[in-house]
Amino acid sequence: MSTKVYVGLSGGVDSSVTAALLKEQGYDVTGVYMKNWSQDLPGFECPWKEDYQDAKRVAVRLGIPFKMYDFETQYRNKVVQYMIDEYQAGRTPNPDIMCNQEVKFKLFLEAALEDGADMIATGHYSRIKDGKLLTAQNLPKDQSYFLYRVTEEALSKSLMPIGDFNSKDDVRELAAKFNLPTAGKKDSQGICFVGKVGIKEFLQQYVTTVPGDIVDQYGRTIGQHEGAIFYTIGQRHGLNVGGGLPYYVVGKNMQDNQVFVTSDIDDEKLWQSELNLTDMHWINGEPDLFKEYQVRTRYRAPLVNAKIKKTDGKFKVVLSEDVRAITPGQSTVIYDGETVLGGGIVI
């Protein structure tokens, strides 16, 4: 009896190649499309039907069974509502991290196992080894940052074969070799459930905002914003402040509906050498806090050496250098070489 694997087929090339590889390796593969979001937004059509059809075509091409799991209600409650609540509180969340934690490696895993699967697989650029999460071989594509909240138990029942590839070109070449209908499909952009819709356009459907003051480092009102909720620490574009100088967002006061900016790139409010974390998650248990680790303070940010300190159950990260635009609500992920230890949310 071969191992029964349910592959999350998104309609993209990475998950398509994942399914093809696992079938070639002798696994008993079933393709599953997760319907997480189907709502159209003004001026934008949700691409779920097209993605569903592409996923189905891949399953037909590979000769594997195909199913659809409808997680839309749970997704709205666990991921979308979380995101809206965080923005309303003045923070900048990362919904993809919550999607992996709550949907792909929880709901999908549970439903698949209940359905008779032994394991699940996804097209993530990361590697799993002995219950540990490792960075992808293709570091520019590495997605381990988004996966740090997945549990060791979930990882032990998951496969991510794409993580072993050195480049996206290799993946596309394989897709062509397997004659997959998604071989030439472009990578999807935007946050996980709104495709090409920008975060501002998305939030405008759910929250009411009023303009307010943009205040510079000298306490002067230098412009008006469209709603403090839309601005994030370090942001430079979209401020519409005159004067010719570039301004950077350094803070917000949600109660007074103010956005604080600076024209000084060296402003100490823009740079930090330590940060506090909440909602910690350790994949394989709490690590040795006497060692030095590497941290990533946002997706694609360079790794920085750091010490992790714990006082009264609270975690502080002391960085080896100043880091720009550390943002409340974003995740800081802690690495030991290529191993992801875990992380937490910046407060």
Image (spheres, rainbow, N blue to C red):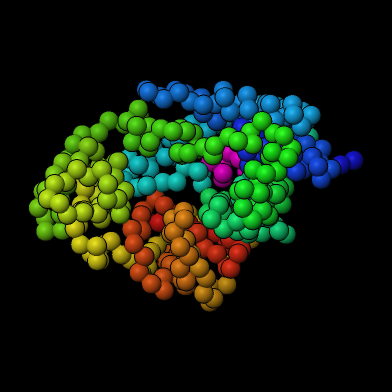
- Check if residue 333 falls in the magenta segment: no
Query: Image check: 260 left or right of 64?
Result: left
Residue located at (66% from left, 49% from top): 170
Task: Answer with the quarter of the image where residue 29 lies.
Answer: top right
Q: Work out which residue is located at the far right of the displayed protein and give it.
A: 1
Q: Which residues are magenta?
A: 99-107
Residue 103 percent location from the top left of the image: 58, 38
Judging depth in this view, the residue of 184 and 33 nearest the camera is: 184
* Predominant SS along the magenta part: helix
Q: Work out which residue is located at the far left of the displayed protein and give it.
A: 220
Residue located at (21% from left, 48% from top): 259
What is the quadrant of the C terminus in the image? bottom left
Judging depth in this view, the residue of 79 and 28 nearest the camera is: 28
Residue 183 percent location from the top left of the image: 64, 36
Q: Work out which residue is located at the far bottom of the displayed protein and give it.
A: 290
Residue 274 percent location from the top left of the image: 37, 68
Residue 224 percent location from the top left of the image: 16, 41
- Check if residue 103 falls in the magenta segment: yes
Picture layout, residue 134 above or below residue 8: below
Picture layout, residue 50 above or below residue 216: above
Residue located at (19% from left, 58% from top): 263
Query: Image check: 251 left or right of 171?
Result: left
Picture layout, residue 286 above or below residue 239: below
What is the quadrant of the N terminus in the image? top right
Task: Answer with the quarter of the image where residue 110 lies.
Answer: top right
From this viewpoint, is residue 220 visible? yes
Task: Answer with the quarter of the image where residue 273 lies.
Answer: bottom left
Total marks drawn?
A: 0
From this viewpoint, is residue 114 visible? no
